[in-house]
Amino acid sequence: MRILVLGSGAREHAIILALRSEDAPHDIFAAPGNAGIAQDADLVAVDANDPAAVTGFANENAIDLVVIGPEAPLVAGVADALRERGIPVFGPGQAAAQLEGSKAFAKRIMDAAGVPTGRAVRAATRAEVEAALDDLGAPHVVKADGLAAGKGVIVTSDRDAALAHADTYLPSGPVLVEEYLSGPEVSLFFLADGDHVLPLSPAQDYKRVGDGDAGPNTGGMGAYSPLPWLTESFGGEDGFVALVTREIAEPVIRQLDAEGTPFIGLLYAGLIVTDAGVKVIEFNARFGDPETQVVLPRLVDPLSELLLAAASGHLEDRARPTFSDEAAVTVVLASEGYPAAPVTGRPLSGLTAAGEVEGVHVAHAATAEREGGLIATGGRVLNVVARGADFAQARDRAYEALGHIGLEGGQSRTDIAARVAD
Ligand code: AMP
Ligand code: GLY
Protein backbone atom coordinates (compact mmCIF):
# COMPACT_ATOMS: atom_id res chain seq x y z
CA MET A 1 0.00 0.00 0.00
CA ARG A 2 1.00 3.61 -0.46
CA ILE A 3 0.33 5.27 2.88
CA LEU A 4 0.60 8.92 3.96
CA VAL A 5 0.91 9.55 7.70
CA LEU A 6 0.25 13.10 8.94
CA GLY A 7 2.06 14.32 12.05
CA SER A 8 5.49 14.60 13.57
CA GLY A 9 5.50 12.97 16.99
CA ALA A 10 6.48 9.69 18.60
CA ARG A 11 2.89 8.50 18.08
CA GLU A 12 3.30 8.90 14.32
CA HIS A 13 6.71 7.22 14.51
CA ALA A 14 5.04 4.31 16.37
CA ILE A 15 2.33 4.05 13.69
CA ILE A 16 4.98 4.02 10.95
CA LEU A 17 7.10 1.41 12.74
CA ALA A 18 4.01 -0.82 13.09
CA LEU A 19 3.31 -0.46 9.35
CA ARG A 20 6.97 -1.23 8.61
CA SER A 21 6.88 -4.37 10.75
CA GLU A 22 4.24 -6.01 8.52
CA ASP A 23 5.17 -8.76 6.09
CA ALA A 24 3.80 -6.70 3.21
CA PRO A 25 6.13 -3.90 2.12
CA HIS A 26 4.55 -0.44 2.01
CA ASP A 27 5.54 2.90 0.53
CA ILE A 28 5.21 5.21 3.50
CA PHE A 29 5.24 9.01 3.35
CA ALA A 30 5.16 11.33 6.35
CA ALA A 31 4.22 15.01 6.55
CA PRO A 32 6.05 16.64 8.18
CA GLY A 33 7.70 13.82 10.20
CA ASN A 34 10.92 14.28 12.16
CA ALA A 35 14.53 13.09 12.09
CA GLY A 36 13.64 9.63 13.46
CA ILE A 37 10.66 9.15 11.14
CA ALA A 38 12.98 10.03 8.23
CA GLN A 39 14.71 6.68 8.77
CA ASP A 40 11.44 4.78 8.25
CA ALA A 41 9.45 6.90 5.77
CA ASP A 42 9.88 9.49 3.03
CA LEU A 43 9.35 12.95 4.47
CA VAL A 44 7.26 15.20 2.26
CA ALA A 45 6.92 18.98 2.43
CA VAL A 46 3.13 19.12 2.65
CA ASP A 47 1.30 21.23 5.23
CA ALA A 48 -0.56 18.57 7.23
CA ASN A 49 -3.18 21.13 8.30
CA ASP A 50 -4.05 22.27 4.78
CA PRO A 51 -6.89 20.17 3.31
CA ALA A 52 -6.13 21.20 -0.28
CA ALA A 53 -2.40 20.48 0.03
CA VAL A 54 -2.94 17.04 1.58
CA THR A 55 -5.63 16.08 -0.95
CA GLY A 56 -3.45 17.29 -3.82
CA PHE A 57 -0.47 15.24 -2.64
CA ALA A 58 -2.60 12.14 -2.08
CA ASN A 59 -4.09 12.40 -5.56
CA GLU A 60 -0.85 13.05 -7.38
CA ASN A 61 0.94 10.24 -5.57
CA ALA A 62 -1.77 7.57 -5.79
CA ILE A 63 -2.01 7.31 -2.00
CA ASP A 64 -4.18 4.34 -0.91
CA LEU A 65 -4.66 5.42 2.69
CA VAL A 66 -4.09 8.59 4.72
CA VAL A 67 -3.59 8.17 8.47
CA ILE A 68 -4.08 11.32 10.53
CA GLY A 69 -2.00 11.31 13.73
CA PRO A 70 -2.69 14.57 15.60
CA GLU A 71 -5.87 16.48 16.25
CA ALA A 72 -5.06 19.69 14.41
CA PRO A 73 -5.59 18.33 10.85
CA LEU A 74 -8.91 16.79 11.97
CA VAL A 75 -10.11 20.16 13.24
CA ALA A 76 -8.89 21.78 10.02
CA GLY A 77 -11.16 19.48 7.98
CA VAL A 78 -8.44 17.45 6.29
CA ALA A 79 -10.37 14.18 6.65
CA ASP A 80 -13.53 15.77 5.19
CA ALA A 81 -11.62 16.98 2.14
CA LEU A 82 -10.01 13.59 1.52
CA ARG A 83 -13.31 11.74 1.92
CA GLU A 84 -15.03 14.10 -0.52
CA ARG A 85 -12.45 13.06 -3.10
CA GLY A 86 -12.94 9.38 -2.32
CA ILE A 87 -9.49 8.93 -0.76
CA PRO A 88 -9.58 6.46 2.16
CA VAL A 89 -8.64 8.28 5.36
CA PHE A 90 -8.31 7.08 8.93
CA GLY A 91 -9.47 10.05 11.00
CA PRO A 92 -12.84 11.68 11.70
CA GLY A 93 -14.23 14.76 9.99
CA GLN A 94 -14.33 18.17 11.61
CA ALA A 95 -17.79 17.69 13.14
CA ALA A 96 -17.12 14.32 14.77
CA ALA A 97 -13.66 15.46 15.95
CA GLN A 98 -15.43 17.89 18.30
CA LEU A 99 -15.72 14.89 20.57
CA GLU A 100 -12.17 15.81 21.56
CA GLY A 101 -12.05 19.54 20.89
CA SER A 102 -15.22 20.52 22.74
CA LYS A 103 -15.70 19.02 26.16
CA ALA A 104 -19.25 20.42 26.17
CA PHE A 105 -20.02 18.55 22.91
CA ALA A 106 -18.56 15.35 24.38
CA LYS A 107 -20.68 15.68 27.51
CA ARG A 108 -23.81 16.22 25.42
CA ILE A 109 -23.10 13.12 23.30
CA MET A 110 -22.44 11.07 26.43
CA ASP A 111 -25.67 12.23 28.05
CA ALA A 112 -27.65 11.43 24.90
CA ALA A 113 -26.00 8.00 24.62
CA GLY A 114 -26.38 7.19 28.31
CA VAL A 115 -22.64 6.76 28.80
CA PRO A 116 -21.35 6.86 32.39
CA THR A 117 -19.32 9.98 33.17
CA GLY A 118 -18.88 12.41 36.04
CA ARG A 119 -21.30 15.29 36.68
CA ALA A 120 -20.24 18.50 35.02
CA VAL A 121 -21.40 22.10 35.15
CA ARG A 122 -20.72 24.62 32.40
CA ALA A 123 -19.89 27.93 34.06
CA ALA A 124 -19.64 31.22 32.18
CA THR A 125 -19.01 33.61 35.08
CA ARG A 126 -16.91 33.61 38.22
CA ALA A 127 -20.07 33.40 40.34
CA GLU A 128 -21.21 30.31 38.41
CA VAL A 129 -17.78 28.74 38.88
CA GLU A 130 -17.90 29.38 42.63
CA ALA A 131 -21.38 27.89 42.91
CA ALA A 132 -20.32 24.81 40.94
CA LEU A 133 -17.17 24.31 43.04
CA ASP A 134 -19.27 24.38 46.19
CA ASP A 135 -21.95 22.13 44.72
CA LEU A 136 -19.56 19.44 43.45
CA GLY A 137 -17.11 19.71 46.37
CA ALA A 138 -13.38 19.00 46.64
CA PRO A 139 -11.16 17.83 45.04
CA HIS A 140 -11.98 20.32 42.31
CA VAL A 141 -11.69 19.72 38.58
CA VAL A 142 -11.80 22.73 36.25
CA LYS A 143 -11.35 22.40 32.49
CA ALA A 144 -11.02 24.85 29.65
CA ASP A 145 -13.43 23.98 26.84
CA GLY A 146 -11.16 23.62 23.87
CA LEU A 147 -7.75 22.53 22.75
CA ALA A 148 -5.27 22.51 25.57
CA ALA A 149 -3.41 19.17 25.21
CA GLY A 150 -4.19 18.16 28.79
CA LYS A 151 -2.85 21.48 30.03
CA GLY A 152 -6.23 23.22 30.29
CA VAL A 153 -7.18 21.02 33.25
CA ILE A 154 -6.56 21.52 36.93
CA VAL A 155 -7.27 18.93 39.59
CA THR A 156 -6.77 20.42 43.05
CA SER A 157 -8.13 20.51 46.58
CA ASP A 158 -7.25 24.20 46.79
CA ARG A 159 -10.40 26.20 46.00
CA ASP A 160 -8.38 29.38 45.32
CA ALA A 161 -6.17 27.55 42.82
CA ALA A 162 -9.28 26.17 41.09
CA LEU A 163 -10.74 29.68 40.88
CA ALA A 164 -7.49 31.16 39.61
CA HIS A 165 -7.41 28.49 36.88
CA ALA A 166 -10.98 29.34 35.89
CA ASP A 167 -10.04 33.04 35.77
CA THR A 168 -7.34 32.25 33.20
CA TYR A 169 -9.83 30.70 30.78
CA LEU A 170 -13.12 32.55 31.48
CA PRO A 171 -12.27 35.55 29.30
CA SER A 172 -12.26 33.24 26.26
CA GLY A 173 -15.46 31.34 27.12
CA PRO A 174 -17.20 29.07 29.63
CA VAL A 175 -15.26 26.49 31.65
CA LEU A 176 -16.38 23.08 32.85
CA VAL A 177 -16.41 22.30 36.55
CA GLU A 178 -16.48 18.53 36.99
CA GLU A 179 -17.09 15.99 39.66
CA TYR A 180 -13.78 14.45 40.74
CA LEU A 181 -13.55 10.79 39.77
CA SER A 182 -11.34 8.66 41.95
CA GLY A 183 -9.57 5.52 40.74
CA PRO A 184 -6.94 4.26 38.31
CA GLU A 185 -6.96 5.68 34.78
CA VAL A 186 -7.12 3.54 31.65
CA SER A 187 -6.76 4.55 28.02
CA LEU A 188 -8.63 2.25 25.66
CA PHE A 189 -8.55 2.77 21.89
CA PHE A 190 -11.23 1.72 19.40
CA LEU A 191 -10.98 1.58 15.65
CA ALA A 192 -14.28 2.95 14.31
CA ASP A 193 -15.76 2.87 10.81
CA GLY A 194 -18.80 5.03 11.46
CA ASP A 195 -21.01 2.09 12.58
CA HIS A 196 -18.79 -0.49 14.23
CA VAL A 197 -15.87 -0.51 16.62
CA LEU A 198 -12.97 -2.85 17.29
CA PRO A 199 -11.12 -2.45 20.59
CA LEU A 200 -7.35 -2.46 20.91
CA SER A 201 -5.53 -3.39 24.15
CA PRO A 202 -5.67 -1.02 27.15
CA ALA A 203 -2.76 1.08 28.36
CA GLN A 204 -1.99 3.37 31.25
CA ASP A 205 -0.52 6.82 30.75
CA TYR A 206 1.45 8.92 33.27
CA LYS A 207 0.17 12.46 32.83
CA ARG A 208 2.03 14.39 35.51
CA VAL A 209 5.56 15.59 34.90
CA GLY A 210 7.18 14.25 38.07
CA ASP A 211 7.65 10.99 39.95
CA GLY A 212 4.76 10.01 42.19
CA ASP A 213 2.41 12.09 40.00
CA ALA A 214 3.87 15.37 41.23
CA GLY A 215 3.80 18.62 39.27
CA PRO A 216 1.69 19.82 36.36
CA ASN A 217 -0.15 17.77 33.74
CA THR A 218 1.73 17.10 30.51
CA GLY A 219 0.98 15.41 27.20
CA GLY A 220 2.14 12.16 28.88
CA MET A 221 5.51 11.12 30.35
CA GLY A 222 5.30 7.35 29.92
CA ALA A 223 2.95 4.41 29.53
CA TYR A 224 2.64 0.65 29.80
CA SER A 225 0.44 -2.05 28.32
CA PRO A 226 -1.32 -4.42 29.04
CA LEU A 227 -2.85 -3.71 32.47
CA PRO A 228 -2.47 -6.84 34.61
CA TRP A 229 -4.41 -5.33 37.52
CA LEU A 230 -7.65 -5.26 35.48
CA THR A 231 -7.86 -8.97 36.24
CA GLU A 232 -8.72 -8.29 39.89
CA SER A 233 -11.94 -6.43 39.10
CA PHE A 234 -13.00 -7.62 35.66
CA GLY A 235 -11.74 -11.16 35.33
CA GLY A 236 -9.09 -10.06 32.88
CA GLU A 237 -8.65 -7.69 29.99
CA ASP A 238 -11.34 -9.31 27.85
CA GLY A 239 -14.07 -8.69 30.43
CA PHE A 240 -13.05 -5.07 30.83
CA VAL A 241 -12.78 -4.45 27.11
CA ALA A 242 -16.17 -6.07 26.44
CA LEU A 243 -17.80 -3.88 29.09
CA VAL A 244 -16.32 -0.63 27.75
CA THR A 245 -17.17 -1.60 24.18
CA ARG A 246 -20.80 -2.29 25.07
CA GLU A 247 -21.44 0.54 27.54
CA ILE A 248 -19.27 3.32 26.16
CA ALA A 249 -17.77 2.96 22.67
CA GLU A 250 -20.75 1.46 20.80
CA PRO A 251 -23.35 3.87 22.23
CA VAL A 252 -21.15 6.89 21.44
CA ILE A 253 -20.49 5.76 17.87
CA ARG A 254 -24.21 5.07 17.36
CA GLN A 255 -25.13 8.49 18.76
CA LEU A 256 -22.65 10.31 16.50
CA ASP A 257 -23.96 8.38 13.51
CA ALA A 258 -27.59 9.17 14.40
CA GLU A 259 -26.68 12.87 14.54
CA GLY A 260 -25.25 12.77 11.03
CA THR A 261 -21.62 13.04 12.18
CA PRO A 262 -20.29 9.49 11.81
CA PHE A 263 -16.95 8.84 13.48
CA ILE A 264 -14.36 7.12 11.29
CA GLY A 265 -10.97 6.81 12.91
CA LEU A 266 -9.60 6.27 16.39
CA LEU A 267 -11.92 6.71 19.33
CA TYR A 268 -9.76 7.19 22.42
CA ALA A 269 -11.67 6.54 25.63
CA GLY A 270 -9.98 8.08 28.68
CA LEU A 271 -11.50 6.16 31.59
CA ILE A 272 -11.41 6.06 35.36
CA VAL A 273 -12.19 2.79 37.12
CA THR A 274 -14.19 4.10 40.08
CA ASP A 275 -15.83 2.13 42.87
CA ALA A 276 -19.12 2.87 41.12
CA GLY A 277 -17.99 1.49 37.75
CA VAL A 278 -15.99 2.59 34.75
CA LYS A 279 -16.54 6.24 33.83
CA VAL A 280 -15.34 8.45 31.00
CA ILE A 281 -13.19 11.47 31.76
CA GLU A 282 -12.54 12.40 28.17
CA PHE A 283 -12.59 11.26 24.58
CA ASN A 284 -9.95 11.98 22.02
CA ALA A 285 -10.42 11.65 18.28
CA ARG A 286 -6.95 10.23 17.59
CA PHE A 287 -4.39 7.75 18.88
CA GLY A 288 -3.03 8.66 22.32
CA ASP A 289 0.54 9.72 22.80
CA PRO A 290 2.47 7.97 24.46
CA GLU A 291 0.01 5.04 24.83
CA THR A 292 0.25 4.18 21.12
CA GLN A 293 3.96 3.54 21.59
CA VAL A 294 3.16 0.60 23.92
CA VAL A 295 -0.06 -0.66 22.30
CA LEU A 296 1.04 -1.00 18.67
CA PRO A 297 4.25 -2.98 19.31
CA ARG A 298 2.02 -5.68 20.88
CA LEU A 299 -0.42 -5.76 17.93
CA VAL A 300 -0.23 -9.05 16.03
CA ASP A 301 -2.56 -8.22 13.09
CA PRO A 302 -1.33 -6.03 10.21
CA LEU A 303 -2.14 -2.44 11.18
CA SER A 304 -2.56 -1.26 7.58
CA GLU A 305 -5.42 -3.72 6.98
CA LEU A 306 -7.23 -2.63 10.14
CA LEU A 307 -6.90 1.07 9.38
CA LEU A 308 -8.02 0.59 5.78
CA ALA A 309 -10.99 -1.53 6.89
CA ALA A 310 -12.04 1.27 9.28
CA ALA A 311 -11.49 3.97 6.65
CA SER A 312 -13.63 2.08 4.11
CA GLY A 313 -16.47 0.99 6.41
CA HIS A 314 -15.61 -2.70 6.70
CA LEU A 315 -14.89 -3.34 10.35
CA GLU A 316 -17.99 -5.47 10.80
CA ASP A 317 -16.34 -8.33 8.92
CA ARG A 318 -13.22 -8.36 11.07
CA ALA A 319 -12.40 -10.11 14.32
CA ARG A 320 -11.07 -8.24 17.32
CA PRO A 321 -7.35 -7.60 16.79
CA THR A 322 -5.02 -9.81 18.79
CA PHE A 323 -2.09 -8.72 20.95
CA SER A 324 1.02 -10.49 22.18
CA ASP A 325 1.35 -11.31 25.89
CA GLU A 326 4.55 -9.32 26.09
CA ALA A 327 4.83 -6.38 28.47
CA ALA A 328 5.59 -3.03 26.85
CA VAL A 329 6.88 0.05 28.67
CA THR A 330 7.73 3.48 27.32
CA VAL A 331 9.55 6.31 29.06
CA VAL A 332 9.50 9.82 27.63
CA LEU A 333 12.60 12.00 27.60
CA ALA A 334 11.54 15.66 27.76
CA SER A 335 13.46 18.90 27.50
CA GLU A 336 14.42 21.04 30.49
CA GLY A 337 11.54 23.35 31.41
CA TYR A 338 8.78 21.10 29.94
CA PRO A 339 5.81 21.55 30.09
CA ALA A 340 5.83 25.29 30.86
CA ALA A 341 8.77 26.51 28.78
CA PRO A 342 10.87 23.78 27.16
CA VAL A 343 14.45 24.65 26.25
CA THR A 344 15.09 23.41 22.71
CA GLY A 345 18.03 23.18 20.32
CA ARG A 346 20.27 21.05 22.55
CA PRO A 347 22.23 18.11 21.14
CA LEU A 348 21.20 14.51 21.74
CA SER A 349 23.61 11.61 22.08
CA GLY A 350 23.61 7.87 22.67
CA LEU A 351 20.58 6.88 20.59
CA THR A 352 22.43 4.11 18.79
CA ALA A 353 23.55 2.50 22.04
CA ALA A 354 20.01 2.85 23.43
CA GLY A 355 18.51 1.09 20.40
CA GLU A 356 20.95 -1.79 20.81
CA VAL A 357 19.55 -2.82 24.20
CA GLU A 358 17.56 -6.01 23.68
CA GLY A 359 13.84 -5.45 23.06
CA VAL A 360 14.27 -1.68 22.81
CA HIS A 361 13.60 0.87 20.11
CA VAL A 362 13.49 4.64 20.18
CA ALA A 363 10.49 6.54 18.82
CA HIS A 364 11.26 10.16 18.00
CA ALA A 365 8.94 12.97 19.06
CA ALA A 366 10.77 16.25 18.47
CA THR A 367 14.17 15.78 16.88
CA ALA A 368 15.98 17.30 13.91
CA GLU A 369 19.32 16.76 12.27
CA ARG A 370 21.98 19.44 12.66
CA GLU A 371 25.51 19.13 11.35
CA GLY A 372 25.38 15.36 11.23
CA GLY A 373 23.98 15.02 14.76
CA LEU A 374 20.56 15.20 16.38
CA ILE A 375 19.07 18.05 18.38
CA ALA A 376 15.90 18.30 20.48
CA THR A 377 13.30 20.58 18.95
CA GLY A 378 10.40 20.43 21.40
CA GLY A 379 9.04 19.54 24.83
CA ARG A 380 8.72 15.78 24.54
CA VAL A 381 11.84 14.75 22.63
CA LEU A 382 11.70 10.98 22.31
CA ASN A 383 10.31 7.77 23.72
CA VAL A 384 12.36 4.79 24.75
CA VAL A 385 10.10 1.77 24.12
CA ALA A 386 10.94 -1.63 25.61
CA ARG A 387 9.30 -5.00 25.38
CA GLY A 388 9.93 -7.90 27.71
CA ALA A 389 8.58 -11.22 28.90
CA ASP A 390 7.25 -9.37 31.96
CA PHE A 391 7.13 -5.82 33.27
CA ALA A 392 10.27 -6.16 35.38
CA GLN A 393 12.24 -7.06 32.27
CA ALA A 394 10.63 -4.43 30.02
CA ARG A 395 11.13 -1.72 32.62
CA ASP A 396 14.78 -2.65 33.25
CA ARG A 397 15.44 -2.56 29.52
CA ALA A 398 13.74 0.82 29.08
CA TYR A 399 15.73 2.46 31.85
CA GLU A 400 18.98 0.82 30.78
CA ALA A 401 18.48 2.24 27.28
CA LEU A 402 17.49 5.65 28.61
CA GLY A 403 20.74 5.69 30.59
CA HIS A 404 22.66 5.72 27.30
CA ILE A 405 20.92 8.86 26.05
CA GLY A 406 22.39 12.27 26.71
CA LEU A 407 20.41 15.55 26.69
CA GLU A 408 21.48 18.47 28.86
CA GLY A 409 18.70 19.24 31.36
CA GLY A 410 16.62 16.31 30.05
CA GLN A 411 13.77 15.14 32.30
CA SER A 412 12.14 11.75 32.61
CA ARG A 413 10.16 9.96 35.30
CA THR A 414 11.84 7.10 37.13
CA ASP A 415 8.63 5.37 38.23
CA ILE A 416 7.01 4.37 34.92
CA ALA A 417 5.41 0.89 35.29
CA ALA A 418 7.01 0.52 38.73
CA ARG A 419 3.75 -0.62 40.29
CA VAL A 420 3.31 -3.51 37.85
CA ALA A 421 6.97 -4.56 37.81
CA ASP A 422 7.19 -5.90 41.38
P1 AMP B 1 -8.35 15.73 30.32
O1 AMP B 1 -7.69 16.84 29.55
O2 AMP B 1 -9.80 15.84 30.43
O3 AMP B 1 -7.85 14.41 29.85
O4 AMP B 1 -7.74 15.76 31.78
C1 AMP B 1 -6.36 15.57 32.03
C2 AMP B 1 -6.16 14.73 33.26
O5 AMP B 1 -6.75 15.35 34.41
C3 AMP B 1 -6.82 13.37 33.20
O6 AMP B 1 -6.06 12.44 32.54
C4 AMP B 1 -6.98 13.04 34.66
O7 AMP B 1 -5.77 12.59 35.21
C5 AMP B 1 -7.31 14.35 35.26
N1 AMP B 1 -8.78 14.51 35.29
C6 AMP B 1 -9.55 15.09 34.35
N2 AMP B 1 -10.86 15.06 34.70
C7 AMP B 1 -10.92 14.45 35.89
C8 AMP B 1 -11.99 14.10 36.77
N3 AMP B 1 -13.26 14.43 36.51
N4 AMP B 1 -11.68 13.45 37.92
C9 AMP B 1 -10.40 13.14 38.21
N5 AMP B 1 -9.35 13.44 37.42
C10 AMP B 1 -9.58 14.08 36.28
N1 GLY C 1 -1.72 10.58 26.43
C1 GLY C 1 -2.84 11.45 26.41
C2 GLY C 1 -3.25 11.89 25.08
O1 GLY C 1 -2.80 11.42 24.06
O2 GLY C 1 -4.11 12.75 25.03
Image (spheres, rainbow, N blue to C red):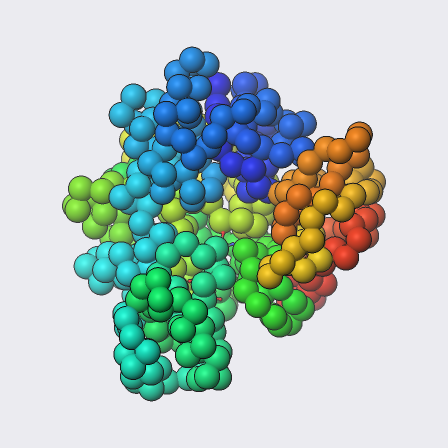
Q: Position of residue 4 (x, y in %)?
A: 48, 25
Q: Nearer the viewer, residue 202 or 257?
A: 257
Residue lying at the far front of the rendered structure: 171
Q: Position of residue 366 (x, y in %)?
A: 64, 42
Q: For residue 182, say whether it is visible.
A: no
Residue 367 at x, y percent in the picture: 68, 39
User: Which residue is pictured at 69% across the width and 36% down the height?
Assistant: 368
In the displayed structure image, the side of residue 291 where residue 82 appears, left or right = left
Residue drawn 48% across and 55% down?
Answer: 149
Q: Position of residue 40 (x, y in %)?
A: 63, 27
Instruction: Work out which quarter of the rendered image holds the C terminus and state it.
Output: bottom right
Residue in the foreground of this view, choosing between 294 and 3: 3
Relative depth, front residue between 258 and 346:
346
Quadrant in the rendering for residue 342: bottom right
Q: Is residue 4 visible?
A: yes
User: In the figure, 29 relative to 362: above or below?
Assistant: above
Above or below — where is 218 with respect to 288? below
In percent of the image, x 55 and y 31: which residue is there?
32
Q: Position of 367 compared to 346: left or right?
A: left
Rendered residue at 32%/51% (across/down)? 99
Q: Is residue 336 left or right of residue 320?
A: right
Total tally of numbered discs in the picture: 0
Q: Nearer the viewer, residue 182 or 211?
A: 211
Q: Is residue 335 above or below residue 49?
A: below
Picture quadrant of residue 411: bottom right
The quadrant holding residue 416 is: bottom right
392 vs 1, left or right, is: right
